[in-house]
Amino acid sequence: MTELLIQTVVQGLLVGGGYALVALSLGLTYNVSGIINFAHGDFLTLAMYLALALQTAWALDPYVSTVITFPLLFVSGVALYWFLLRPVARSQLLMVIQLTLGVTFVLQNGILMVFGGQPVRVPSDWEASLLILGDSLFLRTPQVLAFAGSLLLALLLWIVLDHTETGRRIRAVHQNPRAAALMGIDVPRVRTLTFGVGIGIQAIAGALLIPGTPIEPGQGFRYTVIPLMALVMGGLSDFRGIYLAAILIGVTEALGTVFVSGTSGMIVPYALFVLVLLLRPQGLFRRA
Amino acid sequence: MLEVAGLTAGYGGPNVLEDVSLDVEAGELVGLLGANNAGKSTLINCISGVLRPRAGSIRFLGEDITRAKPSDIVSRGIVQVPEGRQVFPRMSVLDNLLLGGTTAVARPRRADRLEQVFTLFPRLKERRPQYAGTLSGGEQQMLAIGRAMMGGPKLLMLDEPSLGLSPLFVQTIFRALRELNAQGLTILLVEQNLNLTLSCAVRGVVLERGQVALAGTSATLRADPRTRQAYLGL
Ligand SMILES: Nc1ncnc2c1ncn2[C@@H]1O[C@H](COP(=O)(O)OP(=O)(O)O)[C@@H](O)[C@H]1O
Ligand SMILES: [Mg+2]
């Protein structure tokens, strides 16, 4: 029993690390632009299918092909913000939401047209590799790598945002865009580039999540909703909170799946979400 | 130094400014006066490039900057201290100051200017690590001015810096502005406080419902009864 519990919690931690990757990049794009991009998860799907295509065409391992998919995703993020979101950013919230939902539709159907609707697995050399701790704890190497990747990304974000001039500018744009402009910061430029980086990170997240995970065109919504929950639970602009919330969702999801009967186990993270909203609406770790 | 000619501007609706002209010479401290909603903030926001004028031209140091980007205008040396101070609340006083000098032209000189700002407002030095949002109104105003000075302005524009401050802080702020002006800094000062402004400005321009109603030296404006009338919005 305790063995199963430990195995489940560890599994949940690792899955949560994957969610954290996507949640941090969602947090970055949201905080710099003020826009919730409902197509965020679909860019992860796009990154994964690009990795699949590169695997098929040139036998590139998904880890390696990020050197190609990152710039591609970065450019699509830049284009999305500059051509679609920036022009409507000042109009009604609902219109902006509609627009990003429209992007979801285009991406999902585009992928469906090109790759078909069957779930596929991207073959990877790492897929079957296991790390065995002690004599009973089995960890899938790709998941450990994804978790390590999420920690590294969190660290990198913290260094850049809190300890560089670029980060100081991004925080200024987030806290008061008007004042930032009056300081001589090119606000549209900062927003566009940061948005691009946020979408670009999806390429890295995609590569880290691919091994062993079947992919299908419609999966994006899940990778928007769960990170969005982490974002809200974490307190929107508290990256540490977002990270821990994502981990918590991973763990509760794993516990629910293993210990609560049938599909109702998947409800556990949502129940946690509602509970956090009721008890700590300002976010898990933020002072009210 | 600054030449505004025939400026017309608005926000989607009717014109808020109409055919406004205004000159500021190097080294001057010019007061921009007028009742609430006269269009003072609108005018300096046009100069800063955060609002596009509908017609007219703005020239600075002989070059046309009417359609320049705000970041370009700051780099050229026009820095605004906005109404309501607009500090970055969840950043330290030091970070706020450093952001004032974040343009490529200002960055190499940040360390020197930081010392100058701390000399001008020693209070900011004490408060360095504190979040700007936790400062008092007067301290935030010092920070907003210090932050603007970090950009190395040739022309400093202030939008109602005395608004909501205690008399003691108003004195501190105005003493600092006089000192900066005495050191050669050109200043365009938007104010509600008529007497105080005319006491340190060489010249004043009075806006009334988006148009220049009066302009002249501080002495003439002080003597002219229409100044007070325009000011009260009569
Ligand atoms: N962002 C805005 N959108 C629409 N109208 C505005 C905006 N800012 C100011 N106005 C209007 O423009 C006029 C001039 O305002 P403003 O320039 O702020 O005056 P002042 O600074 O002299 O008090 C006012 O009638 C005000 O209501
Ligand atoms: Mg005003």
Image (cartoon, coloured by chain):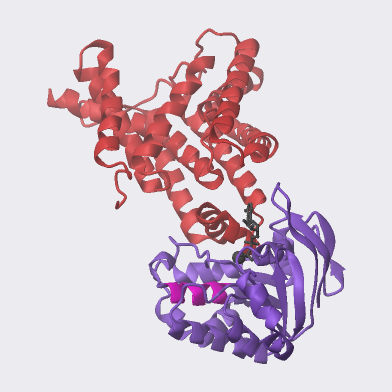
Chain colours: A red, B purple
Q: Where A176 sits versus A18, above or below?
A: below
Residue under the image location 44 percent in, 72 percent down: B137
Residue under the image location 60 percent in, 12 percent down: A112
Q: Position of residue B130 (x, y in %)?
A: 39, 70
- Choose between A138 and A262: the one closer to the eye: A262
Residue under the image location 65 percent in, 86 percent down: B198
Q: Where B155 sits versus A6, above or below?
A: below
Q: Position of residue B90 (x, y in %)?
A: 43, 60
Q: Quadrant of residue A146?
A: top left
Q: Position of residue A160 (x, y in %)?
A: 51, 54
Does the image show residue A124? no
Ligand 2 quadrant in view:
bottom right
User: Quadrant where the N terminus of chain B lies?
Assistant: bottom right
User: Quadrant where the C terminus of chain B lies?
Assistant: bottom right
Does the image show residue B98? yes
Q: Main secondary structure of the magenta part?
A: helix
Q: Position of residue B169 (x, y in %)?
A: 46, 82
- Choose between A130 and A9: the one closer to the eye: A9
- Choose between A140 and A41: the one closer to the eye: A41
Q: Quadrant of residue B176?
A: bottom right
| Number of numbered discs visible in the structure rendering | 0
Indicate left or right for B6 with B46 as reference.
right
* Magenta stretch encompasses residue B143: yes
Indicate left or right for A155 with B213 as reference.
left
Give the farthest residue toward the left: A1
* Magenta stretch encompasses residue B214: no
Indicate left or right for A11 with B203 as reference.
left
Q: Where B139 sits versus B42, above or below?
A: below
Which portion, as a residue range, is magenta? B137-147
